[in-house]
Image (cartoon, grey):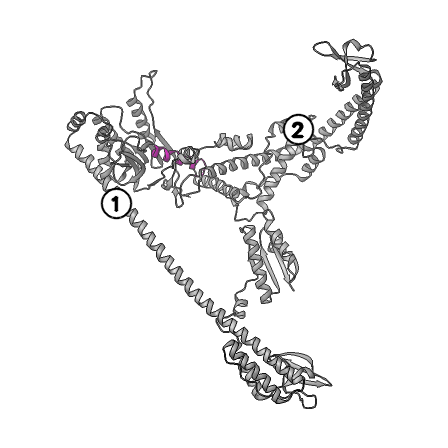
Amino acid sequence: MLDSLCLSALGRHFVAKMQFQTKHDQLQKLLLQTDEFRVLLQSGADFPSQHYHDVHPHLVRASIPGSYLEVTAFFALKMSLRTIRQALTFFTQAEESLYPTLRLLGIGVQVDRNLLLALDKVVDDEGQVRDNASPLLMHLKQELIARQGQLRKQIAGILRHAKTEGWIPGDAEPTIRGGRLVLPVIAEHKRRVKGLIHDESASGQTVFIEPEAVFELNNDIKDLENAYQRELIRILTQLTDQLRPHIPDLRKAYQYLGLLDFVRAKALLASRLEASLPTLNPRPLIKWQKVRHPLLYLTFREQPKETRREVVPLSIDLHPEQRILLISGPNAGGKSVAMKTVGLVQYMLQCGLLIPAGDGSEAGVFEDIFLDIGDEQSLENDLSTYSSHLLSMKQFLLFAGKRSLVLIDEFGTGTEPALGGAIAEAVLDQLNQARSYGVITTHYTNLKNFAERTPGIVNGAMRYDPQRLQPLYRLEIGKPGSSFAIEIARKIGLPAQLVERATQLVGKDKIRYDRLLEGLEKEKADLEQRTAEAEKQERRLKKAAQEYQDLKRHLEDTRLDVLRDAKAKAKLLLKDTNQQIEATIQEIRTAQADKEQTKQARQKLDDYVKKELQIEPPKARPTRETADAATLRPGDKVALIGQDGYGEIMSLKGKTAEVSFGGMKTIVKIDQLEKLGRAEIKEREKKAERNAPQSSGLNMTGRMANFSPNLDLRGERAEDALQKVMAFVDDAVMLGIPEIKFVHGRGNGILRQITRDYLRSVRSVASVADEHAERGGDGATVAVLK
């Protein structure tokens, strides 16, 4: 499977060399490479995935002095070298923290830019020779095209005449024979067309004649083609000579390309298996959460959705105090699959592949793996089933140590149960004393009892439904499992007297033991069902409580929003009414109305406020003097007509005054001012205090203190990044920030493009530029605000 995922023979070469690694540091590096490439593929980054050509045969040919490479070889070299250069650039420009181990692969790899330019000058991206590869080649090409045009015109004229005379069939066209343009003439008219006969059809009814009139043109074209070919060979020879000194560097570069192909294939396989990187320990250890058999997982995934089965994951924990797992249970219950899962996944891991295990998994490094699975009996060597198992046990006892993983299927079978069980128990005791790790499947009761009382060995059972007599394929560590042989025999319909006789023969103790296990299995199943129902009920209660809290919070928020909106509308309405009142008074004053008319107009407005708005109208403002140039003095308090604020006169000059409003000086015409009395000043100060923002409102000082002028967009999707940029720019403009910075990284440039496009569309932005090279360069954007 890994081989099929490679893009070229370069990667497949590394697949063939892949080995079981026992050194922790080397294995950790291989796993990190695969995991980083998996992350790279999932990110959708624009990493080159084409032109992984194996050019080693071309390099061997090019190393011979005086030789030259064909155009196809140079095309493969050019495109694959471009891929290598793009890969090196990708890792150089990426964030250092993203792909540190993949970046290290490219150290020392060089692709000479001048060599690439020389290749590109001769061969285009379609694999064709460029016409301008040399001045002579261009001249020959142009001459060749011109002569071929002349030839086509002349041959077309001869063809028309011959068709008119009936010498050539009406649908015939010129063709090529011996590299020369000829006409297909009917055999009986071949003497009517002057020229050289080159060939005839299989039936002999058509002959191919080169007309005499085009002899010279065909000769000229042939000469030009030969000259073109000579010039091309000269160019290719020169290019090969230029390539030859770079061959050692190129071999290293293509080693790098093959390694990238290999790691990419491992990452693709990890994605298919939904595999991940466990925490790697230098010592032997298996602490896997929800691990799946990789081949079983892929087989089930290929099934139709309506009939697809799910792989039941296993959780296994083997550590120095619990090294050997003894799995028991009924046939077809999943014991062997569980054991093979351990062996295959551990072997995958130590070959540098990610494993299909859940989050939080830990794994260790073993020196070797010993297997006894299947039947190695042989007629040729006079080897029985049990003898083959004993030979395996001999090897295990001789060579298995504390860094070994031992996997044995159907331990002790193949001979008399009492003797086989005794020998198996002795072997198991030896393996335990050697402090080996292992997973062993068995049906023997004596081994289950031995595991129960021996430190370092733990029983495990494949779960089984005793009611329906169906396997559940779930591994439970801590207790042995029953084979359910008597129950299965009764369930499938063996004669009742036969089952009863078997029960008597096996003995009461064995039946009692199996029934105890069966009863425990039933009780466990009932308890799991009740626990699941309780958890379901608890989740339902939590959901109801959460919905209640959400509803309560929604009601409180809604009530506050309604009150806030009502108050805001009331204030706005009151302000509009006050402005209408003031405008009316100003209008009366401007018209030089008397006091009685002013009073009547104000009373009319008060009645309107009471009747229409159902609120008390504002109190009348204290009287104030109209501004007059003769009465005004520096230090007087004045206000702009129709405005709420007030200021202080700093100086007078003719019909204008310099007035300070809140610390800001301005020149105002005197006829636009009104002089304020003490009562009016106090009223305006109280109103300003009432309208001042409360602590619960907009705190601009606090927002400015908490505002950071830097926005990090790395890892964001384009749509989310644009929303963040828009909100960030709005805040910066509102708070008066002079300069802001966006960190988006280099990558494929999408985040940089959308950020700068938006900034250039905002009027408040004065300029947009790269950050200083030492602080990020084009991986960051600096915007100056107006």
Q: Decide whether the magenta segment is chiefly helix, strand or loop.
A: helix
User: In the orientation shown, which residue stands out farthest toward the bottom?
Assistant: 631
Amino acid type of the residue that numbered disc 1 sits on in the rendered structure = Leu
Q: Is residue 660 above or below residue 285?
A: below
- Residue density around tag 1, few if under 14, some if 14–19, many if 20 or more, within 10 Å: few
In the image, the segment drawn in magenta is: 337-354
Asked which quadrant contains residue 219, the reply is: top right
Q: Secondary structure at mark 2?
A: helix
Please indicate whether residue 374 sits to the left or right of residue 180 in the image. Answer: left
Q: Secondary structure at mark 1?
A: helix
Asked which quadrant contains residue 7, the reply is: top right
**Residue 649 visible in the snapshot:** no
Tag on residue 527?
A: 1
Q: Whole-percent x and y of residue 690? A: 51, 78
Mark closer to the chain start, 1 or 2: 2
Looking at this view, is 397 or 676 the one in front?
Answer: 676
Is 470 contained in the magenta span? no
Task: Count the labels in the image.
Answer: 2
- Residue density around tag 2, few if under 14, some if 14–19, many if 20 or more, within 10 Å: few
Q: Residue at x 73, y 10 (%)?
A: 205
Q: Whole-percent x and y of residue 717? A: 54, 50
Q: Is residue 642 above or below residue 407?
A: below
Looking at this view, is 297 or 534 the one in front?
Answer: 534
Amino acid type of the residue that numbered disc 2 sits on in the rendered structure = Thr
Q: Are marks 1 and 2 in contact (CB under 8 Å)?
A: no
**Which residue in the structure is indicated by mark 2?**
72
Q: Is residue 689 above or below residue 505?
A: below
